[in-house]
């Protein structure tokens, strides 16, 4: 699964960029931007690992910290250029949540979770870093707005579990399921699709 590992690191870097950029837009100092980038990148995966009674992966694998440092550095050094590339970063973010979610499902199943728990933990892996980022920035987290975000992750996670049950190759399954998350997110934003609002 070296390809998945590499994409997981890339997703970590992109999430770090996302967190640091959010801090930059609030004119927070360099430490605050670094901290926000860090918790955005590792928040979801760390929460998942805590539920699985495991050490968070970044504690033992320094490559994740290097990816976070690279993301924060890119955000600080190229902040204006990145603002112009918002659409490109959105695409990377959509790819990132897809693979973060599937990696979360894989890890949860590997460590004995039930299928339903693995689906939920996969979603947590993908979205909780953004929840922490938005909370720190005093904004309504994306999953509490009308956008289809966590729902896309749940759909891909369910597909991964179903395909796994019927014996689909795990690598192929990971790419297909992550691709479904990416496409749902892309289509939802492109056509401004959203879930019904309670009381709306």
Image (cartoon, rainbow, N blue to C red):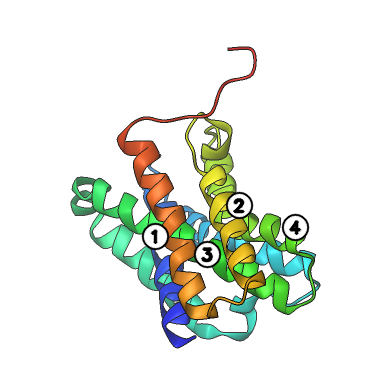
The answer to which of 69 and 121 lies nearer the viewer is 121
Marks 3 and 4, the one that precedes in the sequence: 3
Marks 4 and 1, the one that precedes in the sequence: 1
Quick check: 143 left or right of 113? Answer: left
x and y, in percent, of residue 51 in the image: 78, 64
> Would you say the residues marked 2 and 4 are in contact, meaning their CB atoms lie under 8 Å apart?
no
Marks 3 and 2, the one that precedes in the sequence: 3
Q: What label does residue 145 carry, if any?
A: none
> Dot 2, how many residues are within 10 Å of its Cα: few (below 14), some (14-19), or many (20+)?
many
The CA distance from mark 4 to mark 1 is: 23 Å
> Would you say the residues marked 3 and 2 are in contact, meaning their CB atoms lie under 8 Å apart?
no
The CA distance from mark 3 to mark 4 is: 17 Å
Q: For mark 2, what is the residue?
A: 128
* Front position among marks 2 and 4: 4
The CA distance from mark 1 to mark 2 is: 16 Å
x and y, in percent, of residue 179 in the image: 41, 60
**Residue shown at 62% from the left, 78% from the top:** 57
Marks 3 and 1, the one that precedes in the sequence: 1
The answer to which of 175 and 41 lies nearer the viewer is 175
Q: What label does residue 95 carry, if any?
A: 1
**Residue shown at 48% from the left, 53% from the top:** 32
- On the question of residue 21 being in view, the answer is yes
> Which SS class for mark 4?
helix
x and y, in percent, of residue 9 in the image: 44, 75
**Residue shown at 51% from the left, 38% from the top:** 142
Quick check: 66 left or right of 73? Answer: right
Residue 75 in which image quadrant: bottom left
């Amino acid at each position: 699964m070296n390809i998945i590992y590499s994409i997981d690191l890339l997703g970590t870097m992109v999430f770090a960029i996302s967190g640091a950029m959010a801090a930059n837009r609030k004119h927070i100092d360099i430490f605050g931007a670094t901290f926000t980038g860090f918790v955005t990148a590792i928040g979801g995966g760390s929460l998942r690992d805590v539920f699985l009674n495991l050490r968070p992966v970044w504690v033992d694998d320094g490559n994740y910290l290097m990816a976070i440092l690279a993301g924060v550095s890119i955000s600080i050094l190229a902040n204006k250029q990145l603002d112009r590339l918002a659409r490109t970063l959105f695409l990377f973010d959509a790819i990132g949540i897809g693979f973060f979610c599937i990696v979360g499902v894989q890890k949860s199943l590997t460590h004995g979770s039930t299928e339903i728990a693995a689906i939920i933990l996969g979603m947590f892996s993908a979205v909780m870093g953004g929840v922490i980022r938005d909370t720190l920035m005093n904004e309504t987290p994306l999953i509490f707005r009308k956008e289809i975000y966590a729902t896309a992750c749940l759909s891909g996670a369910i597909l991964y579990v179903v395909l796994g049950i019927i014996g689909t190759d795990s690598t192929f399954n990971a790419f297909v399921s992550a691709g479904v998350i990416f496409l749902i997110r892309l289509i939802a934003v492109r056509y401004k699709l959203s879930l019904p609002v309670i009381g709306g």
